[in-house]
């Protein structure tokens, strides 16, 4: 097929984190690119994920700071009332600015934006919603994921994280089902903004991906803040009517009544019904697109990145994978691929949980108990100590071998979200405990605890 027979060098399905990053990088390499996005530019992250979530998290932090300020003698009420619509309006104004800036960049880079859902007719042809057919040498699938609802009676009565961002008033008494990222983040935000929250988790602890000791301490923190935690919860049904919903467990017990029930029970790839399997693209049992280390699907000129692949479903991962895939296809870098090891993560809880590398349990399993050395620092950040609050931070290093190579860094406490990034670079470079000790501390900070642990 010659270039003249094709409409584009690349058609991208999805204008979220991965799709936009892939389109921009391909265009930078000189490719003729079309991008299909039926919704708002920016996808989940910008519209119903990281960005609005962080805005709400910042507001929740502010609520806490107001209380602190009052204890420190400032003439402010101990609990300031929030005009929720004003907060939402500021948040949405910020998000509209992101949409506009993406539109300008697409225009500037000569990328054709089609406000349409795409469907593969064959391995080189994408059909838009209005029937237009685009022939492309390469296709990038970055269609993301959607919330999964447990298959129980009454599940439709409950809401999901998308609905949380559509709230125009504080939701009052709230149940969150799930013990992962979203349940933990929304619980922290809502409780800090004056709601009463219970988490109902199927697991025996929160945040199964995180170091167990940090998760336990976060649980203590959440209980102190008044968040109800129920573990081993097996959801059987959701009953009642809007405004007074109850959860029933498998043993038949009914919960208190809640004004809102939010399901945060994982997400499912947007991979069905868009012609992928018909075009020869392999999906696994969960519906994730199967890709190799270079993001190639089972059809080599069709690449996939981000949530639709189910691999580390985070925005920076989708972006990094997309850029490298486009460097491989259009940038003359045949070996370009993302290293999925040692990707740092942050859960925006109150306080945040940040981690990179192996948890203590993973290190013990991989290297054996004898080779693992764990260092901890438990301390009260100055802001908490000044008002004699009980909240402590827990910082933890997991080192392996005689040379004490740093294999994991796990931080729970205020500032953890900002502290980890630099240390994640160091861990990826293979530093040892001695390298940390050789670095002079910055005092007085929480971050200095990382280089002072012995
Ligand atoms: C509540 C919440 C909070 C989060 N917080 C964070 C965070 O703090 N940090 C972080 O790193 N990650 C966070 N995430 C995860 C992050 O949002 C996702 O990992 C990221 O958005 C994935 O990017 P993507 O490009 O794969 O998909 P998306 O960003 O979801 O983009 C996919 C796009 O494809 C479009 N699409 C779907 N089907 C088609 C089709 N057939 N044709 C054309 N277009 C189509 C969709 O409309 C959508 O815009 C959060 C997620 C949620 C839900
Ligand atoms: N800060 C961040 O980076 C951030 C924030 C939010 C979301 N995300 C991404 O989005 C993804 C989705 O978030 P999530 O919280 O929905 O998923 P998750 O995988 O983090 O957690 C899902 C939780 O739901 C529970 N669960 C599943 N089915 C259940 C059922 N039937 N009944 C009760 N509990 C059930 C699981 O045990 C788990 O605790 C995350 O895995 C993460 O990759 C990232």
Image (spheres, rainbow, N blue to C red):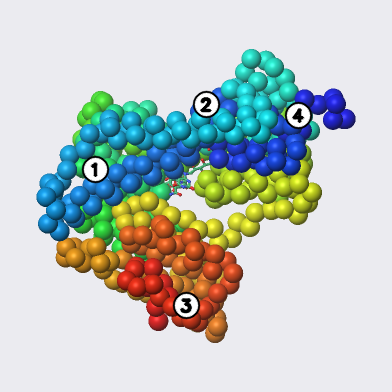
Give the residue at x 66% y 34%. Answer: 109
Report the disc number at residue 167.
Answer: none
Q: Position of residue 441 (x, y in %)?
A: 40, 75
**Pointer 4 residue:** 8
**Pointer 1 residue:** 193
Q: Is residue 191 above or below residue 87?
A: below
Q: CA distance from mark 3 to mark 4?
A: 51 Å
Q: Is residue 421 above or below residue 435?
A: above
**Seen in the image, is 303 located left or right of residue 311?**
right
Secondary structure of residue under mark 3: loop
Q: Specify which label sits upstream in the sequence, 3 or 1.
A: 1
**Pointer 2 residue:** 39
> In this rendering, does residue 306 appear at all?
yes
Q: CA distance from mark 1 to mark 4?
A: 48 Å
> In this rendering, does residue 288 appear at all?
no
Which quarter of the figure has residue 102? top right
Q: Position of residue 334 (x, y in %)?
A: 78, 51
**Seen in the image, is 49 located left or right of residue 378?**
right
Q: CA distance from mark 3 to mark 2?
A: 48 Å
Secondary structure of residue under mark 2: loop
| In front of the other: 450 or 132 | 450
């Amino acid at each position: 097929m010659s270039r003249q027979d094709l409409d584009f060098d690349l058609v991208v399905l999805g204008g979220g984190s991965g799709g936009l990053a892939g389109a921009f990088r391909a265009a930078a390499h000189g490719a003729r690119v079309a991008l299909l996005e039926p919704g708002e530019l920016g996808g989940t992250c910008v519209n119903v994920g990281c960005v609005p979530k962080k805005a709400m998290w910042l507001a929740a932090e502010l609520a806490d700071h107001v209380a602190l300020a009052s204890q420190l003698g400032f003439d402010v009420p101990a609990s300031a009332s929030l005009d929720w619509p004003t907060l939402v309006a500021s948040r949405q104004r910020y998000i509209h600015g992101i949409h506009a800036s993406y539109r300008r960049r697409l225009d500037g880079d000569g990328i054709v934006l089609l406000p349409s859902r795409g469907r593969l007719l064959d391995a080189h042809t994408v059909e838009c919603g209005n029937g237009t057919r685009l022939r492309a040498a390469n296709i990038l699938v970055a269609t993301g994921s959607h919330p999964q609802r447990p298959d129980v009676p009454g599940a439709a009565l409950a809401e999901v994280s998308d609905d949380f961002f559509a709230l125009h008033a504080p939701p009052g008494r709230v149940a969150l089902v799930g013990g992962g990222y979203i349940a933990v983040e929304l619980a922290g935000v809502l409780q800090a903004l004056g709601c009463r929250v219970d988490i109902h988790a199927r697991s025996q602890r929160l945040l199964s991906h995180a170091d167990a000791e940090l998760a336990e301490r976060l649980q203590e923190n959440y209980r102190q803040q008044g968040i109800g935690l129920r573990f081993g919860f097996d959801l059987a049904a959701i009953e009642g009517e809007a405004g007074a919903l109850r959860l029933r467990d498998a043993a038949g017990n009914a919960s208190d009544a809640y004004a809102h029930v939010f399901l945060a029970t994982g997400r499912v790839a947007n991979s069905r019904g868009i012609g992928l399997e018909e075009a020869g693209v392999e999906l696994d049992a969960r519906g994730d697109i199967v890709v190799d280390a270079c993001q190639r699907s089972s059809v080599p000129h069709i690449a996939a990145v981000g949530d639709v692949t189910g691999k580390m479903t985070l925005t920076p991962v989708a972006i990094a994978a997309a850029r490298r895939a486009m460097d491989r296809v259009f940038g003359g870098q045949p070996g370009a691929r993302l290293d999925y090891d040692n990707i740092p993560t942050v859960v925006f809880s109150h306080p945040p949980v940040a981690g990179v590398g192996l948890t203590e349990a993973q290190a013990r399993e991989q290297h054996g108990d004898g080779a693992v050395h764990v260092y901890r620092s438990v301390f009260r950040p100055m802001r908490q100590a000044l008002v004699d609050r009980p909240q402590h931070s827990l910082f933890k290093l997991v080192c392996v071998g005689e040379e004490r190579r740093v294999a994991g860094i796990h931080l729970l406490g205020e500032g953890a979200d900002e502290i980890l990034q630099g240390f994640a670079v160091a861990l990826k470079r293979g530093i040892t405990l001695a390298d940390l000790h050789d670095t002079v501390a910055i005092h007085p900070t929480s971050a200095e605890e990382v280089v002072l642990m012995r």
